[in-house]
Image: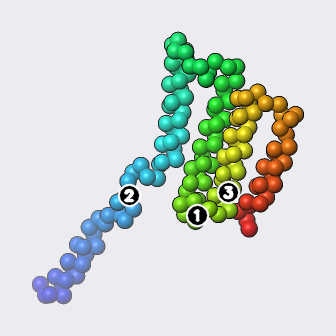
Amino acid sequence: MSSVDEKSKEDTQISQQPSVPASSSKSPLKGASGSWALGLAVAVIGGLLLAKNLGVDLFFLDFHNWWAFFILLAAIGPLQLAYRCYQREGFGAATLNALVTAGSIIFIALIFLMDLSFGTWWPVFIIIGGLYMMTSRNQ
């Protein structure tokens, strides 16, 4: 065999070896952090409800609208988005928009948890609408 044949054979062997993608160096949990946190929250809530059914006295589940805590779960996503936006670009419009979203969800949950009257607090939704317009991502 000539040296040219040997070189092409080596090149073929090198190109046939499986390459390791650059993304494999990342932690497997890094991309799933959002679903991990939400899964943890759901598991904790399930555990609390099970404990109540087994006779454990949980003072925060004694009132009639304990189900409004589930509304608070919806605020986890916007809060995580606000944190990611803050890490990426600082305190900008995207961060503020995500915080307004989380604040809106938390406010709705508090209305139910604290037995507040929608008749009294409805103007807050107009304020929230104005905040959304001010923090729009399309600017």
- Marks 1/2: CA–CA distance: 24 Å
Q: Estimate how packed mark 1 is, as few (under 14), some (14 to 19) or many (20 or more) residues with alpha carbons within 10 Å.
A: few
- Amino acid under label 2? Lys
Q: Which mark is residue 96?
A: 3
Give the camera-side residue of 30 and 115: 115
Q: Residue at x 60, y 48 (%)?
A: 79
- Amino acid under label 1? Gly
Q: Residue at x 50, y 25 (%)?
A: 47
Element on which disc 2 rests:
loop
Q: Who comes first in sequence, dot 3 or dot 2?
A: 2
Name the side, left or right, on which 74 lies relative to 125.
Answer: left
**Badge nearest the viewer, 3 or 2:** 3
Disc 2 target residue: 26
- Marks 1/3: CA–CA distance: 10 Å
- Amino acid under label 3? Leu
Q: Which mark is residue 90?
A: 1
Task: Evaluate if marks 3 and 2 touch, with contact meaning CB atoms under 8 Å apart.
Answer: no
Q: Quadrant of residue 133?
A: bottom right
